[in-house]
Amino acid sequence: MKTGLQPGQTGELNWVVDANMVITLGGDSRATVFSTPNMILLMERAAKEALRPFLDAAEESVGIDVNIRHLAGTGIGSTVTGRARVTAIDGRRVQFDVEAWAGNRLLGQGTHTRAIVAVQKIIDNLAALSPEEGLRNLNAQKQALPTFPTLLVNIRNRVATVTLNRPQTLNAVDVQMTEDLEKLVAWLAGHEQQVRVVLLTGAGKAFCAGDDVRELPSLSTETARQLSLRQAALYLAFERLPQPIIALVNGDAFGAGCVAAYSADLRIASHAARFAMPEIRLGWPPGYGLAQLTELVGKARALELCLMGKPITARQALDWGLVNEAIPGTRLMQRGRELAESLLEMPAEALRATKRLIHLDEGSQPKVAHRADTESYIRCLQLPDAQEGLAAFAAKRTPKFNGQ
């Protein structure tokens, strides 16, 4: 915690009330008002803003107590203001008087206490409390670069070229590749000086055909659940890496391969590349990545990809905003290196901060939708249609689902 925080320090935050911030009373749409939980959240966030200049890079403030009175209401479209003023400081605990206003009308007021904590301590505590999820440690690692059975990693001039290297399976992601990618992400997180840009591509004719469906029948239900959660955390961790990641999509990017591509910061596709979320054609929904896909291409396009399960071309992907460029395959690696060189010319810390802030600004809530994605995937995986889908995949025939 930095020095200088004193009683009287203030923070202020303005929101425009939207449909996610209201509650309708008595079932009458005319009585739709700014909800109490969102009013409290506004005031807490104002207090968080007051503390932000005094936090070290690895710290955050968390609310530990709130006492609020809701005094008046306001509707959709109103501009509401949260104000917080420091009243007392007790070590790493800070007390506030807080208020919420709509113009000159006082909506609510009360007191609030926040604690300043190390983010890593929160991560460690959550990991200790949730061992059942089986999520691997994706925290920064300082050791030497390990060897990877399923990845090729070449580092030159602070650019890491990472190649998914299971060409015999079209680079399908199995348990081993999941573990290798986890280790790589942890290593990259701990080596921001040595590596400043990452290029991600696939060996052979595919970028990544998705999760290794042939491995799935050998996994228990619980192992499949833990693997799905690990993979969701892995691709979300791409956002938190200090290095920009450029996906060079040299061929098919299906299922998990499509998720890996759109989890990168930039995506360059060869004209031969195709993108698909084909899980529905095997009998289950995607286990993770739906929220990120919808954020990128919009709800209508995400529904089309996931409900139909059909591939789209690189040109369509460009039109939909799924990729940044579509170019001849012979130029793919060259273009990736050109972009990497351009990024290396940027100020390093500003580049890292920009990536972090853009991903941070996608929403105030953490990305936890993959938990529901995984549970739906596991439930469907145990149904007869999924067994038919697996059998049809193994026999290279069209599945015959029961239609119920």
Image (spheres, rainbow, N blue to C red):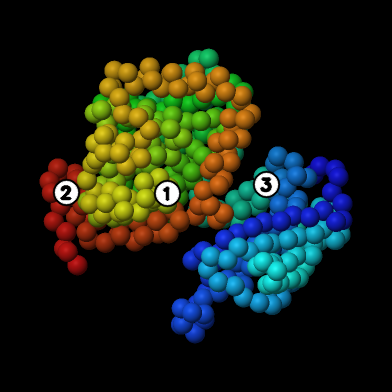
Marks 1, 2: nearer the viewer: 1
Marks 3, 2: nearer the viewer: 3
**Residue 371 image offset from top left, x and y in percent:** 45, 56
Disc sitting over residue 119 in the figure? 3
Q: Secondary structure at mark 3?
A: helix
Disc 1: which residue: 295
Q: Secondary structure at mark 1?
A: helix
Q: Secondary structure at mark 2?
A: helix
Residue 228 located left or right of residue 96: left
Q: CA distance from mark 1 to mark 2?
A: 32 Å
**Residue 144 image offset from top left, x and y in percent:** 58, 23
Tell me the residue at 22%/61% (across/down). Answer: 384
| Badge 2: residue crowd in 10 Å (few <14, some 14–19, many ≥20) | some
**Residue 123 image offset from top left, x and y in percent:** 63, 48
Question: Could you tell me the amino acid type at mark 1?
Answer: Glu
Q: CA distance from mark 3 to mark 2?
A: 47 Å
**Residue 398 image offset from top left, x and y in percent:** 13, 49
Tell me the residue at 40%/45% (across/down). Answer: 296
Mark toward the start of the polypeptide (1 vs 2): 1
Q: CA distance from mark 3 to mark 1?
A: 26 Å
Quarter of the image containing the C terminus?
bottom left
Tell me the residue at 61%/69% (across/down). Answer: 37
Q: Is residue 62 visible?
A: no
Q: Is residue 357 visible?
A: yes
Disc 2: which residue: 392
Does residue 253 sit above or below 330 in this rendering?
below
Question: Could you tell me the amino acid type at mark 2?
Answer: Ala
